[in-house]
Image: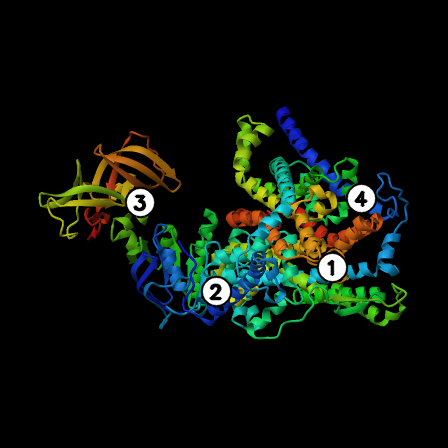
Amino acid sequence: MSKPTTTTSRITIGTISMYGALFFLALFFLMPAYMAIVTALKPPAEINLSTAWELPSKFHWSSFSDALSLLKSNIVSSVILTVCATTLSTVLGSLNGYVFSKWKFKGSEFIFTLFLFGMFIPYQVILIPLFQTLRAMNLYGGLPGLILAHVVYGLPITTLIFRNFYSQIPTALIESARLDGAGFFSVYTRIVFPLSIPGFVVTGLWQVTQVWNEFLWGICLTRHADNPITVGLAQLAGGQAVSWNLPMAGSIMAAAPVLLIYIFLGRYFIRGLLAGSVKE
Amino acid sequence: MANVEIKKVVKKYGPVEVIHGVDLSVHENEFIVLVGPSGCGKSTLLRMVAGLETLSGGEISIGDRVVNNVSPKDRNVAMVFQNYALYPHMTVRENMGFSLKMRKKSKEEQNERVMEAARILELEPYLERKPSELSGGQRQRVAMGRAMVRKPDVFLFDEPLSNLDAQLRTQMRMELRKMHMRLKTTTIYVTHDQIEAMTLADRIVILKDGYIQQVGTPIEVFEKPNNVFVAKFIGNPPMNILEGVCNVIDGKRFVVIGKTRFPIQDGVAAEIVDGSPVLAGIRPDSIKMGQNVERLPKDWWCHGEVVVSEILGAHSLLEIIIDGENDLLAEVEGRIVAHPGETVRIGFEFDRMVLFDPETKMALY
Amino acid sequence: MREASRDRLKAFLTLLPSIILIGIFVYGFIGNTVWISMTDWGGDGALALEPTMNFVGLANYSDLFTGFLSSGFRQDLVNAVYYSIMLLVGAIGLGMFIAILLDQKPKGEDILRTIFLYPMALSFIVSGTIWRWLLAPQGGVNVLPTYVGLPPLTFQWTSSTKAILEFNWQNLIQIFLYIASFALILVGLWILKNNQKRAVKYWLGPGIIVGLIAWFGGGLFPEALFMEETHGFNLATLGIIMATIWQYSGYTMALYLAGFHGISQDLRDAAMLDGASNASYYRHVAIPMLKPITISAVIILSHISLKMFDLIFAMTGPDNAQTGHPALNMYMTTFRANDFARGAAIAIVLFMVAAMFIVPYVVSQYRQRTKG
């Protein structure tokens, strides 16, 4: 019935300075995107530090196809990696979240806390044993080892998101299903899983962005042939005599999948973003 | 202290008009209760007095000042919200002192006024606690204390008791009444609960669909409702309304409902003549049983068949069919043990019967 | 009853694989890294599957903090500390500011929110690559002023060798004491108005004593190094800080905006009726109410800044001395120089610093959950 209203809708100094501040901030935030697009569309000869901000005289689309041919194998690796790692860590996270929220046992909160801690460690601290273990398991250098790492270290966040999601399902619903004769797994398949679609979307999108964007493990745990897109891009941009249209085109291509998710499914993306920090 | 004048006030949300030119004068020191079903516009009206909603038309003045364009903080009104709206990160002391701090009052004055309010409301032991550490009733008192320390011209209450359990609500209702007797601050109080309205108000304003239905003292609106809506809204159980026709028999007028006849008092509603369709309103408590029937004139007696009866402690509620066809609710004194199907003698206080025009639903006196 | 206990067993068994994985891959590996950091694993033959490792105690750590050749690491550590502080202040400040602006419900709020948040969706490698180009010395940001008629900037964003706020690493102990004293006095002043006795007894008093010890006892402390070695805030890291703030203030904005939207309209109305202006509403009501969000943001941002690797890698390469960071140093030491023991020691130092923030946070969350 009662809606918030502002007392006056007149133009005041306050509103002018607010829109002014928002305008300049928006410019600051869009500046790198503009620069990337403009540079990617210029032919190499036209790229010049002093005219970097100017629009290209003619759109030069071939940077994209050139960058694509250089990054093709990286993109294939990243797609395989992202699909496998996201699926596995999301499914495991869902089962864990189900247990942590609806089948609490003595010590389960403590175990959950130990899981959470895994989310906040600087990954450098597990990098050397991880490297050694993957070598010993004959998984070093290829995608399976990288997938394993992403699944294991993705578990804390996926478990957290699902646990918080499932704690919103009323316990009475679970109890009535149990009175109707459903056991641990049938409660999950009949009641919890069908209600989890939004949870899977949020967690899945979050994992897709994390895995797709990850770099440290990519560079430390894979050989050249299986490098993910971020490593490929870093190598493309890392050369000294680099012509900037290629890295910019590569950046845009590396960013595109995640940016599209963000623009079209932003609501779910933000929920994943907030899940990592807001407790219950 | 100040009076509040509401003149031709209109509120629109986009094209939808929700309050249609309301006029109301709230006198100094008066306790006014706005009551009505949800969506009637009572909270919107209150929030317009507070300055939390803009007016789409009309004028509101507090004291002698038109406040249409005065911001809420400069109106010197204090409001108690349904969910109390206490600041969760502040202690009770800080919550109550916040408005004084915002108004840059001295530390001594802040402290003095907070202590005074805390003493009146018996909150002294809780001053250093956070709202989350208080019970519902204590939070309610903190919300009142926060309003009190301001010494405002007008108190505004937006359903302040509806989050409390029944017992606490009764207790807080009396405390509110006592507080008003002590402070005498002009008060506008919104509720959907007609018992709160009846017990607290100097005058009740009944609203429906953005129109005022009636303004009057609790007794006035109870005994002399303006229309069928007010008659049914005020009073619990609601008034019995029966549809009939006026017939003149031996020079006396009666409401005839099938086989039943209710006598119309002389001098009442002269426009009702032989053949006029009419609605008869009978308050459940104007039906008497047992000894009390004796005090009524004999021709106000009749017999009825009990359908169901409930004993509510000091009084009883019965559903009775008279003349085998007209169903009535009766609220009678004492514990009446009656079995379904039993025939009982009842009497009506026909001088309290209210007649309505079936077309306009307006009362005829 | 038997059915119920069998269900609980199933629940536990469902969790078991994850418990084992986390147990080994997180806790086992941390323990293993601690062990490696106390060996001499490295050099020739380090990449053998069964490398020779001898226990050397804390030698790697003492070398990192006092060894003649490790001044690069010490500068990296100093960089990381400054970097964390600047990122916290910048991203929380800017994010909060934008959130307050958007909370005024400007027209186009949805689009603006999207604009402020999109950097969060990018990989650090992508944003690092773009920022590297933007911060090129003769172009990008430096030529922007020429478009409004001003001379171009000449700042060497990622390669400047200038440093400010320098201090001598020899006086490390003294500096730590000054910082401790400052922190104690600050907390003491904070508490003073609520609880005078406790403030003086536990915070102000000790703070002043520690400060006096540092002041008068300065010369008596053992020196960490045998020669003077200055470290400071390398201005070259400003570009990296700016890029990180650009990428993460949208995140803090989203946190605060969610928090602001969660505050009931009634509370806002109550503050207005209590006489609070828009500014004092945020100062006294909204922002203090969102303290849990601020704490979360501090934890997450400091965690990010302490492990920051990709962005610096992409902006300056892994071995730029001016913009070094322990995370990059660890990578170079371990995977380029094959000095695994030393790399492990750097990782443990990073982990310890991160743990100072994270352990209290995770423990307090655990307490809240088991209490409620």
Which residue lies under the disc numbered 2?
A: C272
Which element is circle 1 on? helix
Disc 3: CA contacts within 10 A as few (<14), some (14-19) or many (>=20)? some
Of badges 2 and 4, nearer the viewer stands: 4
Disc 4: CA contacts within 10 A as few (<14), some (14-19) or many (>=20)? some
Residue drawn at point x = 32 percent, y = 48 percent: B235
Disc 1: CA contacts within 10 A as few (<14), some (14-19) or many (>=20)? many
Of badges 2 and 3, nearer the viewer stands: 2
Label 2 marks a residue whose chain is C
Label 4 marks a residue whose chain is C
On the image, the x and y values in percent for residue B263 come to 17, 44
Of badges 3 and 1, nearer the viewer stands: 1
Of badges 3 and 4, nearer the viewer stands: 4
Q: Which mark is residue C80?
A: 1
Q: Earlier in the sequence, mark 1 or mark 4?
A: 4
Rounded to the nearest whole Å, what is the CA distance between mark 3 and mark 1? 74 Å
* In the rendered image, residues at marks 2 and 4 fall on the same chain: yes
